[in-house]
Amino acid sequence: MGLRKDFLWGGATAANQFEGGYQTGGKGLSSVDVIPKGENRFPVMRGEMDYRTLPQGSYYPAHEAVDFYHHYKEDIALMAEMGFKAYRFSMSWTRIFPTGLEKEPNEAGLAFYEAVIDELLKYDIQPIVTICHFDAPLQLIEEFGGWKSRQMIDCYLAYCQAIFARFKDKVKYWMTFNEINMLMHLPFMGAGIRFEEGENKQQVLYQAAHHELVASAKATALAKSINPDFQIGCMLAAGQYYAQTCHPNDVFDALDKNRDNFFFIDVQSRGYYPAYALKYLEREGIVLEMDATDGQVLRDNTVDYIGFSYYSSRLTGTLEREGEQTAGNVFATLRNPYLDRSEWGWQIDPVGLRITMNALYERYQKPLFIVENGLGAVDHVEEDGMIHDSYRIAYLKDHISEMIKAVELDGVDLLGYTPWGCIDLVSASTGEMSKRYGFIYVDKNDKGEGSLKRIPKDSFYWYKKVIASNGKELDTFEKSSL
Ligand code: BG6
């Protein structure tokens, strides 16, 4: 009973929010490099505002982020000190192919990730690589319109070929696209899409989705041809929808919203467009351009495991549309009166994690991997230089308890748990530094000022104990000096 002996405890980050070095080592510009902090952030991420019209002097938090690029040895040593078994990070496409169109990969980019991976392996930390985490070469956006265009598929595959070949003996777990369903909500951030006047947005989004789904399946085929032991996963922004009341219309509404989320994973895991999606496309008059072989490609190359992020459940209803809304992981949702909320309005629902795990496992019958979870909160450095983040420990403890119940009591097969932003990083939604998730504090503020010094928080020592006990000791921890 209990978690697997080789359970992958660790943490997760993404290049665009963590790495910095945006023009170092020959890196080209990415979509995230032109997403500013402030009031224009959401319009740009949604593809409704052209980044080229942004005012001079806009601040771009991804440029430096927290400079993992120059701190990776120190950061990985801290992860090792916590006992990490795995570290999930994304590679930046434009470090490998600066414009996305080069014939050969950029050696400096490959060498950087090789150095990171070798450092991880030195401590027996398993690298888990997200191939594309809210990141597309700007040049491809300018030339092709991002994932609107089918030409993206070959560019993406060239990038996959380069990293699969280089790291074939060093990386086992890969994910093709982070939160692939985010494309529907933040099209520029998720897929480099900017809308033209009069464009049918749903048509554009589903066509882009199709391109990403085919790219993901072709990447899976390519991966297996390079190393049959590679494990390729999808990655969903998960969080079960609940019905606001037991009125059957509300129950159906929740079912319908859950399907919207499952759509991508249904294709990636089962290998075909589900009936409800085909009916939706037909009703909306959306006609997808597909190559004759696409259906076969999707069918033959399904994923090995289901990676997902979970921050909160969601609530929906048809009767009380006016019900109070609250923020969520990009998706606003109705306020659930039974749940507390974070400082950013995200509802806190540990049991929802167990519910979500069960829903995913029953639907796909494939191993799950919780690759993001956590509490974004403001931290204070006390006079003694410490950060006492008992609120974060409470959040994680409650979620880990429910995660273990899903494994022990419900029989869910779970590969690992890599909570988000294990070292503080830039928030994807707001661009803030003050929305912190880490076990390790980074001295940097929302204006971009700070020494970038790393300081372990109380949760660092707590998580170390959790890992050492394989999830058995969730209550006690002692601080020891490093
Ligand atoms: C997920 C993303 O949506 O949630 C991360 O994969 C993101 O990139 C995380 O950072 C938390 O969201 P936020 O907006 O608090 O950074």
Image: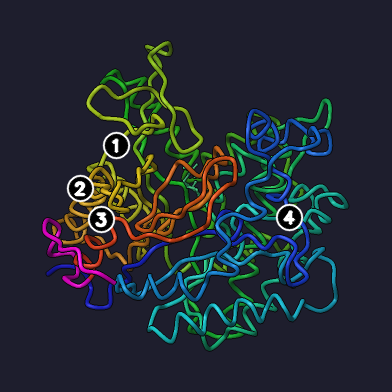
Closest to the observer, 82 or 125: 82
Closest to the observer, 406 or 441: 441
Disc 1: CA contacts within 10 A as few (<14), some (14-19) or many (>=20) = many
Name the residue type under label 4: Ser
Q: Which residue is mark 2?
A: 398
Q: Which residues are magenta?
A: 468-482
Mark 1 touches mark 2? (CB < 8 Å)? yes
Name the residue type under label 1: Ile
Q: Is residue 350 above or below residue 228?
A: above
User: How far is the residue under mark 4 from the one under mark 3?
Assistant: 35 Å
Q: Is mark 3 within 8 Å of ligand 1?
A: no
Q: Is residue 82 above or below residue 290?
A: below
391 with respect to 72 (left or right):
left
Which residue is painted at 50% across and 44% down in the image?
Answer: 433
- Mark sitting earlier along the chain (4/3): 4
Q: Which residue is mark 4?
A: 30
Q: Which residue is mark 3?
A: 458
Q: Is residue 267 above or below residue 39?
A: below
Closest to the observer, 237 or 433: 433
Q: Where's residue 469, x and y in %?
A: 16, 70
User: How far is the residue under mark 2 from the one under mark 4?
Assistant: 37 Å
Q: Nearer the viewer, mark 4 or mark 3?
A: 3
Q: Main secondary structure of the magenta part?
A: loop
Mark 4 touches mark 3? (CB < 8 Å)? no
Mark 4 touches mark 1? (CB < 8 Å)? no
- Mark sitting earlier along the chain (2/4): 4
Which residue is painted at 62% across and 52% down in the image?
Answer: 134
Name the residue type under label 2: Asp
